[in-house]
Image (cartoon, rainbow, N blue to C red):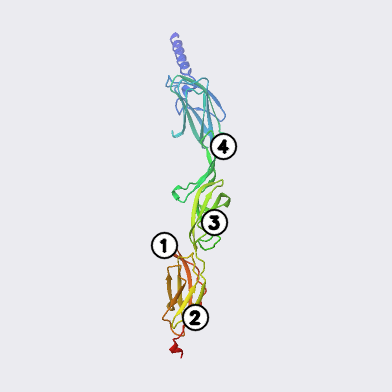
Amino acid sequence: MKKISSILVAVFFVFVSLFSFSSNALANTMKTAIGISLGQTVNEKIDSSSSQTKYLWLKFDCLSSNYYDFTVSGVELPLSDVFLTVYDSENNVINSNVNTENEYSFVSTTYLEAGKPYYFRLECLKGTYSFSASLNIHNHCYTNFFVKAVADDDKENRLNGFSKLLCNSCSNEYIVQNIYAPSTVKLSSTKITFNPYGSYPSVTVYDSVGNLISPSEYVVTYDDNFKTGKAWVYVNFVGNNYKGELTSSFMIIPAKPTPTSLKSKKSKQITYSWNKDSNASGYQIQYSTSSSFSKKKTKSYIISKNSTKSKTFSSLKKKKKYYVRMRCYKTIDGKRQFSSWSKKMSEIGRASCRERV
C-alpha cells in the first residue's frame, strides 16, 4: 500500500511540474499558439534561456479585412531586440518588426484578410521579457502627399504627378488624383499669313491621356512672330498641378501679293509687274491661255530674288488672251511656303506692225 502511495505522489509531482510553466511554455509553436481576440490584452513572458519559453505564438482568426495594430508593451526594457513576425496559415511571412532594446513598447501594423487565421510570433534573444500584447483595428492618420506632373519636350523627361493620402503610422496609401504629364500643344493654325502687328495663334494643351488642361495652369509667350518664317510658342506651366515647359512652332507666310500691271508693249510679249515684298524670299508666276490655269496650258516660273518687280513673257501667240497670276514664298526649314494666289490679270498678245497693216 505504501508503495502504491509513493507511486501516486511521484505521478502527482510529475503532473505538477509539467503544468507549472507559464502559458507560453505551451505556445512555443504555431500549432500550440494561444488564441487572441480583437480588443483582447494578454500578459506573457518569454525567456531566451529555454527552448520551451524562447518563443510565444499567438493566433488570430480574422473576421474582417482591415489593417490591424499589434501592440506590445514591456514591463521593463528588454535586454536585447524583440522580434515580431506575422505568418499566414501556410507559414508565409506577412510582416516583421524589430523593437530595439531601448524601447519599452512598439506597434506593428499589418493588413489581414477576412476568413483566414494569422499567427504572431515574439522572440527575445537575451534574458527574459515580460510584456502585454493586444490586437486592435488600426486607425489611419492620413497626410496629403502631392507631386506635380512635369512637362518637357523630351518624352523621356516627362513625369506624371499625383495627389495621395499616406498614413503616418503604416504603409497604407491611396491615390486621390492622378495628374498626367502635359504632352501636346495644339495651335489654332500652324500656317499664318503675315501680320505687321504680330501673329498669335490660340493655344490648347492636352495631357498624355488626352485630357484638356485648363489655361489657368500655364502662361503662353510667343517669339519671332512679327516677321515671316518660323515662329515659336512657349507654354510655361505655373499652376497648381504642373511644372516645366512645352514648345511648339508655326509658320508665318507672306501676304498675298499685289500685281500692278500687265501690258503688251511689243509684239508677242507681255510684261507683268508687281510691288516688291520684302517679307518674301521670292515669287512664283504663272501665265496661261486658260482662265482656270489648267496644267497643260500653263507655264510656271520661280523668281528667287525678292527685289525683282517684273517679268516679261515672250514668244506668245498673236491675238491670244493670256492670264497671269503670282504668289510669294518664304523658305522655311528648306522648303518653300507659298502665300495665296493673287487675282488673275489678262491681256491679249499684240501682233507685229506688219501684221496690223
Label 2: which residue?
A: 347
Tell me the kind of residue under disc 4: Tyr
Tell me the kind of residue under disc 3: Val
Circle 4 — which element? strand
Label 1: which residue?
A: 334
Q: Earlier in the sequence, mark 4 or mark 1?
A: 4
What crowding class fits label 2: few (fewer than 14 Cα within 10 Å), some (14-19), or many (20 or more)?
some
Q: Nearer the viewer, mark 3 or mark 4?
A: 3
Q: Nearer the viewer, residue 137 or 35?
A: 137
Label 4: which residue?
A: 142
Q: Nearer the viewer, residue 308 or 167?
A: 308
Residue 224 lies, with reference to residue 12, above or below; the image says below
Residue 336 lies, with reference to residue 37, above or below; the image says below
The x and y percentages for residue 204 are 54, 55
Whether residue 208 is visible to the viewer of this picture, yes or no, is no
Residue in the picture at 44% in, 80% down: 269
What crowding class fits label 1: few (fewer than 14 Cα within 10 Å), some (14-19), or many (20 or more)?
few
Q: Nearer the viewer, mark 4 or mark 2?
A: 2
Label 3: which residue?
A: 203
Q: Earlier in the sequence, mark 3 or mark 2?
A: 3
Residue 321 lies, with reference to residue 202, above or below; the image says below
Residues under labels 4 and 1: Cα distance? Answer: 58 Å
Q: Nearer the viewer, mark 3 or mark 2?
A: 2
Circle 1 — which element? loop
